Image: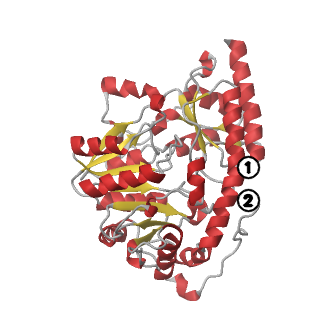
């Protein structure tokens, strides 16, 4: 009896191979080994999702919404005005009290998720040089590849300096490379660096002086661990340092996803000068058409300033404990941490001093999968739009090959179980060495 011959996968000339982002790659690999998000036996330290349980001192979690019949209709592309007004009011009350320039509904646009917001911004950019940092959020890579009008220019951050980058260095990069915009996550995903306080004010001053737009992904702005920023309510945002909301070239992206711990709602926003809001809303008209109207309506009640501060305090208390647990646990088994996270809910750690079989990100990732622990190898954060850094430069990306990103978003019990299993991974590799 002849063995069946498998047919080659079909190809289609019109379509290219589209790479998966780091989180999608690792969860896809995990699913091949039986991963189920609802299964209690898996520890997902890969996905950037905060635990959704009630936290002590936080407002009660929303468990149901009522849908007005009128909200069965399409939402405006820029979002419903009531939610836009609530967001503008939140920023003004928390960050701009007493300042002459205040955000209005015209400074806010609503999107159906963080990637949708980023995509709108990217689609609205002109024929410019856009600076971005290495390492940074994995989804930036394909985002910066798809739109051809602008040229992405990488800016390297050095682990030896704790990934520091001053306002003076920003000025030099803008002038030397002819940058018209800079995109970054702040707090930074995956490294946990925060540009805050006077330093952030200086960055905005540079952007204002040189007319270089700062596009700031602030989705982790309520997860701030630096003691000097605690006096600001535990929230670090550029909105505190904008002088004129319609003239300063500052674009802020945020949403319910991380800071309010409602990722499934896919309700996010952009806060920017009205001219930029007009442009990204026009881009949304052909890219996505707008977000969910019922969820936008329901989101209004989550944006009360006092409730927002209570949620942030609860995050700081509970996630701070998990941060320390994961940080200590990884160091105990031999990981090196370049910078204890100043923000986000990630630890960016190097496996270089682990046993040889697991001393790089991909090897450790696969070994941890055998024990039902999901992590993200550091290679995915080497943002390289269009894979332009080929040849010898491509090999230079090995500087992130030893690293992994570990999330302390899951509940404490999951982190403790994951650390126990990671100790087993390291012990097994040590016996084999």
Left or right of residue 127, residue 360 in this image? right
**Residue topped by disc 1:** 411
Residue 61 position, x and y percent, is 71, 68
Residue 236 position, x and y percent, is 52, 56
Left or right of residue 102, residue 22 in this image? right
State the image quarter where residue 258 is shown.
Answer: bottom right
- Residue at left 54%, top 88%? 70
Residue sitting nearer the eye, 375 or 24: 375
Viewer can see residue 331: yes
| For residue 5, above or below residue 213 | above
The CA distance from mark 2 to mark 1 is: 8 Å
Image quarter where the N terminus lies is top right
**Residue topped by disc 2:** 53
Viewer can see residue 258: no
Q: How many marks?
A: 2
Left or right of residue 284, residue 111 in this image? right
- Residue at left 54%, top 64%? 266
| For residue 289, above or below residue 133 | below
> Marks 1 and 2: in contact by CB < 8 Å?
yes
């Amino acid at each position: 009896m002849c063995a069946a011959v498998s047919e080659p996968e079909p190809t289609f000339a019109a379509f290219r191979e589209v790479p998966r982002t780091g989180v999608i790659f690792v969860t896809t690999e995990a699913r091949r080994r039986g991963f189920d998000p609802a299964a209690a036996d898996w520890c997902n330290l890969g996905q950037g999702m905060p635990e959704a349980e009630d936290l002590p001192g936080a407002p009660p979690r929303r468990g149901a919404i009522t849908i007005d019949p009128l909200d069965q209709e399409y939402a405006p592309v820029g979002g419903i005005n009531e939610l836009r007004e609530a967001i503008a009011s939140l920023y003004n009350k928390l960050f701009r009290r007493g300042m002459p320039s205040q955000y209005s509904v015209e400074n806010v646009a609503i999107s159906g998720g963080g990637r949708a917001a980023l995509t709108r911004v990217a689609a609205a950019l002109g024929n410019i040089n856009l600076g971005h940092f290495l390492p940074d959020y994995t989804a930036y890579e394909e985002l910066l590849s798809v739109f051809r009008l602008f040229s992405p220019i990488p800016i390297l951050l050095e682990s030896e300096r704790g990934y520091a980058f001053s306002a003076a260095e920003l000025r030099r990069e803008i002038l030397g490379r002819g940058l018209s915009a800079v995109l970054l996550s702040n707090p930074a995903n995956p490294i946990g660096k925060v540009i805050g306080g006077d330093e952030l004010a200086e960055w905005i001053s540079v952007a204002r002086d040189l007319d270089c737009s700062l596009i700031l992904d602030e989705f982790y702005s309520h997860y701030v661990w630096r003691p000097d920023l605690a006096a600001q309510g535990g929230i670090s945002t550029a909105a505190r340092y904008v002088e004129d909301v319609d003239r300063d070239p500052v674009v802020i992206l945020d949403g319910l996803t991380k800071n309010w711990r409602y990722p499934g709602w896919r309700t996010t926003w952009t806060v920017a000068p009205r001219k930029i809001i007009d442009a990204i809303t026009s881009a949304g008209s052909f890219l996505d058409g707008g977000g969910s109207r019922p969820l936008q309506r329901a989101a209004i009640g989550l944006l009360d300033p006092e409730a927002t501060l209570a949620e942030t305090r609860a995050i700081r208390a509970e996630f701070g404990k998990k941060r320390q647990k994961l940080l200590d646990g990884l160091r105990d088994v031999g990981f090196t941490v370049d910078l204890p996270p100043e923000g986000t809910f990630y630890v960016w750690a190097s496996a270089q001093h682990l046993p040889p079989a697991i001393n790089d990100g991909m090897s450790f990732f696969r070994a941890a999968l055998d024990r039902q622990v999901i992590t993200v190898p550091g290679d995915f954060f080497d943002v390289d739009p269009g894979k332009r850094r080929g040849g010898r430069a491509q090999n230079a990306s090995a500087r992130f090959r030893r690293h992994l990103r570990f999330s302390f978003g899951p509940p404490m019990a999951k982190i403790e179980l994951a650390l126990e299993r990671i100790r087993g991974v390291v012990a097994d590799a040590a016996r084999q060495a």
